[in-house]
Structures are given as structure tokens and as C-alpha cells.
Amino acid sequence: MQTKITDAVSAASTALGIFEKPVLEHPAELSHGDYSTNVALVVAKKRGENPKALAEKIVTELGAIDGVEKIDVAGAGFINFHLSRSVFAEGIQEILSAGEKWGRNDFLSGKKIIVEYSQPNPFKPFHIGHLMSTTVGESISRLVEWSGSDIRRMNYQGDIGPHVAKCLWGVMKNGSDPKSIAALGEAYVRGATAYEDDAHAKKEIDDINKRLYAGDVELQPLYDAGRKASLDHFDELYAILGTRFDDSIFESEVWKRGIAIVMDGLMRGVFAESDGAVVFKGEKVGLHTRVFITSQKNPTYEAKELGLIEKKLERFPFDLNITTVAVEQESYFRVVEAAMAELWPKTAGTYTHRAFGMLQMTTGKMSSRKGNVITGESLIEDMRAKAMAKMEGRELGDAKQATADTVAVGAIKYSILKQNAGKNIIFDPEQSLSFEGDSGPYLQYSHVRARSVLEKAHTSHLTPQISNPPEEVTELERLLYRFPEVVVRAQKEYEPHYVTTFLTDIAGAFNSWYAQEQIVNKDDPASPYKIALTKAFAQTMKNGLWLLGIQAPEKM
């Protein structure tokens, strides 16, 4: 319908000597129609005409449009389009026919796309920043997957560098078990604190770091044990979060080639020497200078990133790479992208990032260096316990714990994805678990409620049909057909929050309608249509939750 109306407005405008391309939007108020355009206001301003009079001329020229029940002019000159009852009934049938494919498209068909996210470093805790990256990256991956692209989910992890040296120093000083996640976390904090407070410890840690880069065989058993324990632990968390990766690349695989790339770039004039270090002078492209190789001849994160890019291109020659980064890393990443564009001009514009904000508790920003970190695991466990308490009294049998886990993860993910990815989030555990709106469990419970209605209809031998719809179009119907548009916008901007907002809106519309209607009623000729509408809602909610990486349970 959007294309049909746009074409009709374009034709009518052209007939009046107007060549401005109309833009269609959904009015904020459903009473104002299903689509609206401000083309008359835009043109009238340029011409110095009365916008309302111009809008009325366009409407007169438009005439009737198939599927549009009414066209009116509102406000200063907006043209509003009200769709007919048959369009919404057909929309419900389209949802039911498409099923799990409802909302899919070929927006990025034929493109090879890498989404790199999560990026926890072995030998350090999986903190809530990694939980943010994992949640945002998983949802972006699903949006990209739904666009018809050939996607590769990738994880990049720092398994070499100063943080490893600090952890191993702490392990050796305390005789800790390198196979214990708790012991590794304590050892890292001990080493990080000593590195800043104790000059002798700093020298010892720097020496361990040099030995690691040199491949010291004496450190290898300790290093291997700690690395394996960390990676196994991360996999356990990914299983809980419903995340999987197609590929993983480690810093130990790319740091040498990163140095080689930078040194080659130095010879080509891409980089410059400064006080014994090798830097990229970002000021030439409106950025800032960053070090790529230190004066001690060690690669920085920036140099390793260049090695990573080359490695990615070898493993999966991409048309587009999207990397999730914390907002505070954006400036660093822009410099890397600028250096990449100079090194490999053909790849310019293919390597981009999506920034995410910080997840904060009441204590504010947390640091794993000082040890006052809330790990991803501890937050998940706390939410699981709270969700389990909410399940008390519900007859779920052996599925109670699994349901609590689903609710807990849904609560965390919704809180992260409900607003623009770049904004900081104050996480409220109690609010996030609410069943009464603006939460993951609210969306999940709305889906469960719809499934319960469908089960009741099945036992009553009533099947969904789009014949005999009620005369009045519901708010729910006026929202459901917008889902594919919402998905495309989220895909184009790599912004899952558009989906989150939409699902919250349709959940509210469904629950209001549910409270006012007897959906399953053998004596109501419209009951089969209401059941069809319920099924369309359940399918849309399930598809939308999948895009967010949130499981849609059958019972709660």
C-alpha cells in the first residue's frame, strides 16, 4: 500500500507541476489515518503558497485509490490516508500465510556481511559491557540475516597483551589455580592493581608480557590452562544468552601481521614515526593521532585491528563489516577505519561500527581493573533467582527453571535493546522483570496469552479465518501490518530498538483488545476472524522477539 499511495501522490503532484518526491509516514495518532504526507507543506513553503490549499488541490487530483477508504487534509496541510477494512483483513491473511517468514526481505541479498561482537578477553571477567556487546551484536546479526545476506557472526578476543601478563603475574604470586574462573578474576585484579601501585611489580609484569610475545615455553602451560578455562566459561554464557558464532579470531593470530602492515604503511607514508613510536596522524582527516606501535616496539590494539581486518578478508571476503564497540572506543575505531582506507583504498566504506552505551547499576560505571565489576554471569544469576521467585505459584512443573531462565535473559536483553544503542542504560532489576509493560517479560507474557487463546480455540474446534471481520478496524490491526517497515528501518540503521518499541506497542494494543473482547465464542460469527487476528499477533510477536534474541515461551 505504501508504494501504491506514493505512486498515486507522485502522479497527482506531477499533473499539478509539482516534482517533489512525496514521503509517506505513519501519523502519531491512529485517528489521523494510516499514512500521511507533508509534500504540500514542503512545496508550498518553497513557492510561497498556502499549504492547505495546495494539499486540497493534490487530493482533488488524486481521486480514488484502491484500498484507501478516505483521504483528508489536516492541520496546516498534511494529507492523510485511511485504509479500507479489506486491506487490514488481507494483511492478517498475509501474516498467517508467511508465518515465520513474516517480516523477512531481500534488502541485503547477495551481500557477504560480517558482524563482529561480544569480544571478551580471556584472563579477564566477562563483564556487563560484554553483555551489552553480545546483546546488541546478536540482534544486529539477526536483522542482517533476515535481509537475505550471507552473514558470518564473528568474535574477536584478546588472548595476548598486558592484561594476560597481569593475570598470570597474579596467578604465579598467589599460587592460584589457572583452571578456576574465580581465581583468574582475582588474579587479574591483583595484577592490575600492583601494576599501578608497585614499580617492582610493574617491571615484573612488563617482563612477563615480553616473554608472552616472544613465545616463552615456560609460560605456555600456565597460559594454555587459563585461556581454555576462560573460553569454556564464555561458551557457557553464550549458551544461556542464545548466542552462537561462526568464527573466532584471537589477537595471538593477528598481532604479528598487524606490525607488518603498519611497518609497510610507514614506508608508504600512511604512518609516521614519533618519539620512537609509529603513529597515524588522524588530524589530516579531521581525527586525532594514535599510536599503532609503541616505542617498545609492541603493537597496540590499533595495529592488531589492522591484522584482524586482513585476517577477516582472507577467511570471509566481506562486502560489509559491522563491529560493535563501546561509545568510549568510537574515536579509536574511527582512526583505525581512516588508516584502513589509506592502506587499502578499495575497502573504504566497507568497515563500519555500531557503538553501544554503558550498562550502569546504582553504583555507576564499573571497572574490572579495580575489581568492583558486576560480571555478566553474576547479573544473569541474580536475574535468574529473581525470575524464579516470580514463578512461585505457577504450575510449570519441571519447566519452571527453564522458564525462569528465559524470562531473566529476556528481561536483560529488552532493557539493553529498548533504546538507541549509543545511550547509557540504568538497569533496574525489578522493573525489568515486570509483567505489566515496558519489559521483556511483558512481551513474552503477551505472546503466552495469545498462545493460550489459540489453544482454547483449538479445543473449541474453532479455526482462524479472515471472513466475517468486525466492521470496526482495531488498533492492533492498524499496527500489525507495519512490521516489515519497522524491520527494514532497523536493518538500515542497525538499530534493534525500533523493533523493541514496535513490539511494546502491539503488545499494549493486543492486551487492551483482549480485555474488551470475548475472542473464542462459538455464537459469534466474527470469532474466527478474532482468532486469526490473535494468531497474527502471536506470529508477529514471536518473529520480533527472535530478532531481539529473546525467546518466546509457550507458557509462563
Image: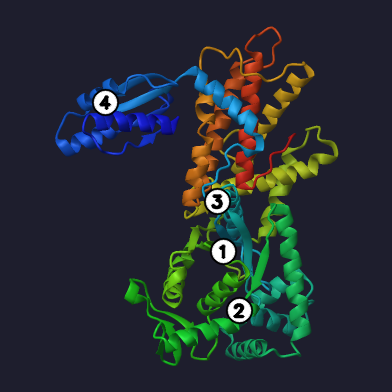
How many numbered marks appear?
Answer: 4
Q: Position of residue 74 (x, y in %)?
A: 30, 24
The amino acid marked with disc number 3 is: Ser
Q: Amino acid at mark 1?
A: Met
Question: Which badge, 1 or 3, comes first in the chain's sequence?
Answer: 3
Q: Which residue is mark 4?
A: 58
The residue tagged 2 is: 254
Mark 4 to mark 1 CA distance (whole Å) = 58 Å
**Label whose residue precedes the other's in the sequence (4 or 2):** 4
Question: Which comes before the other along the chain, label 4 or label 1?
Answer: 4
Tell me the distance, in whole angstroms, between the alpha carbons under discs 1 and 3: 40 Å
Q: Is residue 203 visible?
A: yes
Q: Residue at x 51, y 14 (%)?
A: 472
Q: Which residue has dot 3 on it?
A: 109
Residue at which label 1 appears: 366
Query: Looking at the picture, which amino acid does disc 4 mark?
Result: Ile
